[in-house]
Image (cartoon, helix red, strand yellow):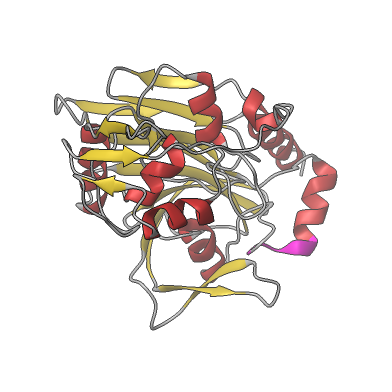
Amino acid sequence: MDPSGKDSATWIEADETVAGQRVDNMLAKVLKGVPRQHIYRLLRTGQVRVNSARVDPTYRVQQGDRVRIPPVRIAQRPAPQPAASMRFQPSVVYEDEHLVAVDKPAGLAVHGGSGISRGLIEAMRLARPQLRFLELVHRLDRDTSGILLLAKKRSALTALHAALREGEMRKLYTLLVHGRFTAPRREVDVALTKYLLPGGDRRVKAGAGGLASRTVFTRLRLIGAYSLLQAELLTGRTHQIRVHAAHIGHPIAGDEKYGDFAANKALARQGLKRMFLHAGRIEFRHPATGAPLALEAPLPPELSAFLATLEEAAAGG
């Protein structure tokens, strides 16, 4: 209350853009720059209320809820210079009022965290300030390039997540692996388990006791001592293609986590400076109309150029 006895707080009504979010996450977006600990203190002391009642941080906001936002002062800081990721201009593969598909370059994380202040989603929100809602539908590893879907409406996000859960979204990747892949097609059905290295870095291993994981590898062509493959994800586990490829003795060229490290150094001298894994095609039904969509992103120039170099060397014996 201010000295006149009037409530100086702001009341907002939750709409579909925030419906379903935890209240602490919603507040973090509304109160930009306010530390999380302060947000939790506002909730704990009842300064934030939903429909005039106290709630804990895990409360899920419902459309139509009236949320009390108390006046909060934060220290003003000089605006930081935009990071490289914030200057990222997305290569848009497809866009309408419900979703946008971008061709993510290798080396750019999809979101901030784990020592990365900003990623693609933050860059996209900065580039599209008029959008009230923009969320990742799925993820790609930082070192993987290719098609990434983002939802521009919560209804689209919900529908696309359902398609992922029910196996109704087809994701195809192009990869170059070490060794000659002799089978035209091979399905790998091996469980995967996450674990942490002593330094805290995340890894995944294949073996019994983990989450069921299935990948189908199809041979595209043999190139000397390497094979160009297509991989289709039948499940969507962390690092799935990379770990399954290594598990069957065909690690991905340039993979710094699960690859052949000595061979990768030799490939770097030949011009391969990144992991050869690209999310080239995605097929699904439009979340609003149900119409089938098939989106493609060509191999990045650096991968196409390296492939041509490799093929020339193989042709020359």
Residue lying at 26% horizontally and 27% vertically, measured from the top left: 293
In this rendered view, identify the residue nearer to me: 206 or 183.
206
User: Which secondary structure is most common in the magenta stretch?
Assistant: loop
Residue lying at 58% horizontally and 68% vertically, measured from the top left: 203
In this rendered view, identify the residue nearer to me: 118 or 50.
50
Q: Is residue 262 left or right of residue 12?
A: right
- Position of residue 157 relative to residue 142, above or below, is above
Q: In terms of image quadrants, where is residue 63?
A: top left
Q: Is residue 40 left or right of residue 95?
A: right
The number of discs equals: 0
- Position of residue 221 relative to residue 303, above or below, is below
Task: From the top left corner, tell me how far across and down residue 49 is, in percent.
Answer: 28, 48
Q: Is residue 159 left or right of residue 170?
A: left
Task: From the top left corner, tell me how far across and down residue 266 is, in percent.
Answer: 82, 53
Q: In terms of image quadrants, where is residue 69?
A: top left
Task: From the top left corner, tell me how far across and down residue 258 is, in percent.
Answer: 63, 64
Q: Residue furthest bottom?
A: 209
Residue lying at 28% horizontally and 31% vertically, measured from the top left: 12
Q: In this view, does 55 lie to the left or right of 209?
A: left
- Position of residue 76 relative to residue 131, above or below, is below
Question: From this viewpoint, is residue 297 visible?
Answer: no
Task: From the top left corner, tell me how far across and down residue 92 is, in percent.
Answer: 46, 20
Q: Residue furthest right?
A: 269
- Position of residue 119 relative to residue 127, above or below, is below
First to last magenta residue range = 258-262
- Does the stretch in magenta take in 55? no
Question: From this viewpoint, is residue 193 visible?
Answer: yes
Looking at the figure, which quarter contains the N terminus?
A: top left
In this rendered view, identify the residue nearer to me: 43 or 306.
43
- Does the stretch in magenta take in 261? yes
Looking at the figure, which quarter contains the C terminus?
A: top right
